[in-house]
Amino acid sequence: MRLFKAVADACVVAALLVCALFASPIRAETLISASCQLPARVAVAAPDTAGELRIFTRDAQGHWGPADFEHQDGMIVLQLNPEKTGSSRMYFLINPRPHIDLNDTKPPLLLGVKVDGNPLPLSTDQHIGEFPNPPQTIAFGVAERENPLDLHSISAKINNQPVDASHMPFSVISLRQARIYVLTADLSYGKHKVEMSVSDEAPLPNTLTAVVRFDVFDATNYALAAQGATLAADSCLSNYESLTSLNDGVAYPPGPGRLNDVSWASADSSAEHWLEIRFGQTRTIGELVVFWTLYRGRHHLPRETDVRIPEGEDWVKLDAKRIDGSGDNCITTFKFEPIELDRIRVYQGARAGSDNAPGYMWVTEVEAR
Ligand SMILES: [Ca+2]
Ligand SMILES: [Ca+2]
């Protein structure tokens, strides 16, 4: 009995809230949603327009049909019947526009995707490759069969950040067809994800989302996996066995975490540590850049580090100028006379890591050019 009263009270509160929201007369198409677990009645002010009042509600199968209501003294009284609709969440649509297909459950269609004018396969989520320069524009052709497109719903994100309207122009071909452009020319090196969304004008909108992914790489950086390079290391700290994040072009990974998805750490030991870049072919190299890991404000820049090249079975130190970054640039740049080679190593001296972690080497990215 106590439970019954609590639920009944909740229904009354819901009803009062709906009434408060619609104290002024309804003029245009209006969607009302109400939550109630027991039969109840909700009164809302009636539209002040003349003509027939049309009110629809959704049944348990999601179909819209005429709603039970009374119209008197300028008020509409709606019957909330959760048993009949099969859900505690009920929807009422008052005076829908005549051309709207209420039972539309399909999102707009993707008609085509183009990158800088070149058509791509028709897919709502695709990786389109690696580029030395970012694309200028990604264009999405969209069409809606059942209802008009809701042009106010058009949105885009680049790397999960909302795109400003000035970088997302669109052209309207008809009420049901549009071309939406996302401008991507300003992107830097690394992995990118461009996401576009658009909805239809169904009472409960259906949304199309299309995603295009690509990588932008520095064409002068021969250490990149995209350039055919692979990596090797003397050892790995537990759970840091993968080296793939060290030559993926992302030198400044987002977020505070520095796990193996964005960095590699050697074993914590008293040995020298090294990371080897295997170019896969002979390259002319005169600069090696190491992005050491910066974690929770602590730099893991080693006290001793050098570059070595193969000589027979040995690795010999290269006469290189070492330039360390400052501030948040936890970087060492080695500069030397350009030399032809197919592999090169960066070493960290024995127990010569950072002051707070001398036994291991911790790197986020390497570049060679
Ligand atoms: Ca639709
Ligand atoms: Ca990286």
Image (tube, rainbow, N blue to C red):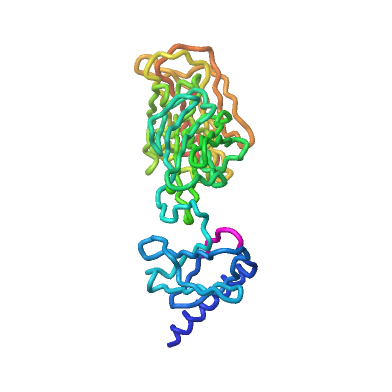
Asked if residue 17 can be seen in this view, the reply is no
Residue lying at 61% horizontally and 39% vertically, measured from the top left: 165
In the rendered structure, the answer to whether residue 257 lies left or right of residue 169 reads left
> Looking at the image, which residue sits at the far bottom?
1
Residue lying at 48% horizontally and 16% vertically, measured from the top left: 285
Residue 30 part of the magenta segment: yes
Dividing the picture into quadrants, the one containing residue 47 is bottom right
Residue 347 in the image: x percent, y percent? 46, 27
Residue 103 in the image: x percent, y percent? 41, 55
Please name whichever residue, 92 or 240, is drawn nearer the observer in this view of the structure.
92
Residue 87 in the image: x percent, y percent? 40, 68
Residue lying at 54% horizontally and 37% vertically, measured from the top left: 172
Magenta range = 27-32
Asked if residue 142 can be seen in this view, the reply is yes
Residue lying at 46% horizontally and 26% vertically, measured from the top left: 346
**Is 101 located above or below residue 363 in the figure?**
below
**Is 223 located above or below residue 212 in the figure?**
above
Please name whichever residue, 49 or 139, is drawn nearer the observer in this view of the structure.
49
Please name whichever residue, 274 or 364, is drawn nearer the observer in this view of the structure.
364
